[in-house]
Amino acid sequence: MNFKLLAAPFAESDIEWRVKQAGDKNGKPWAMVLAYLTNRAIQQRLDDVCGPANWKNEYTLGPQGGILCGISIKCGDEWVRKWDGAENTDIEEVKGGLSDSMKRAAVQWGMGRYLYKLEAGWANFTTNGRFTHRDKQNKYHKWNPPQLPRWALPFFEKTPTFEGVVCINDTVCINDTELSNLEILIEQTNTATADFCKYLNVAELHHLPAADYNPAIRALEDKKGKMS
């Protein structure tokens, strides 16, 4: 199991936003907002990476109230569990506590941890916004979240293709287009292909499992970003 896949960036549709601070200036609303993952996205990521039968969650009461969530993943013949917790929320307090504690437990496994690197952004208020904020005067305002930086997004949307696909020991490897994308970034970052293959634990670059493609791209993009 490649745990790097758990920590890979999520699609924008999997990201929710909440208002941290809000007010109005010169009659116009403003809001500082924070990003977080939806529970459904966490569950789907665990299903995709671990398999539905190889992870589980459980809940217990926190030592001073609130709820603790433990996410367990089967690693070989053993179950490894990581815990975190949250207070009950003001709205649907038990359901909110369960949801928030699972999101925090997911961070212990790396899911959504990259979102903590984001600075609080500013909401874009518009009449056709995705979210709604109610101000102190009980007026409702529509808003859209700020645009995520490139490093916080999946680098390439993978489309179904069988062009140039290689299978090693029944494992589907990257296709010709994906190989070309990696080779371009390897050249741009002055990375030694042999060293990168060693890092990826493959004999040849074209033997890279398709499931490991996005983390490989992300590693090269991170290196490229530090060079600029």
Image: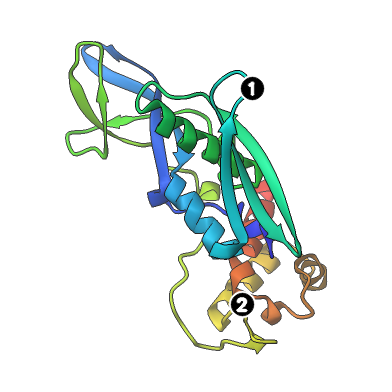
Q: State the image quarter where residue 157 is shown.
A: bottom left
Most foreground residue, 211 or 155: 211
Residue appearing at x 31%, y 20% in the figure: 30
Residue ID for mark 1: 63
Amino acid of disc 1: Pro
Q: How is the image coloured?
A: rainbow
Left or right? Give the position of 204 relative to 215.
right
Left or right? Give the position of 28 relative to 220.
left
Most foreground residue, 213 or 48: 48
Dot 1 alpha-carbon crowd within 10 angstroms: few under 14, some 14 to 19, many 20 or more: few
Residue appearing at x 50%, y 50% in the figure: 42
Q: State the image quarter where residue 208 is shown.
A: bottom right
Quick one: SS at disc 1?
loop
Compared with residue 190, is residue 24 higher up or lower down, i.e. above or below?
above
Residue appearing at x 44%, y 78% in the figure: 160
Residue 154 appears anywhere in the view:
no
Residue 143 marker: none
Residue appearing at x 53%, y 40% in the figure: 102
Quadrant (top left/top right/bottom left/bottom right) for the N terminus: bottom right
Instruction: In the displayed orientation, state which residue is furthest to the front.
Output: 60
State the image coordinates of residue 23 (x, y, percent, origin top left). Answer: 32, 14
State the image coordinates of residue 137 (x, y, percent, origin top left). Answer: 20, 11
Q: Nearer the viewer, mark 1 or mark 2?
A: 1
Amino acid of disc 2: Leu
Dot 2 alpha-carbon crowd within 10 angstroms: few under 14, some 14 to 19, many 20 or more: some
Left or right? Give the position of 119 relative to 26.
right
Residue 178 appears anywhere in the view:
yes
Residue ID for mark 2: 179
Most foreground residue, 69 or 129: 69
State the image coordinates of residue 7 (x, y, percent, origin top left). Answer: 61, 51
Quick one: SS at disc 2?
helix
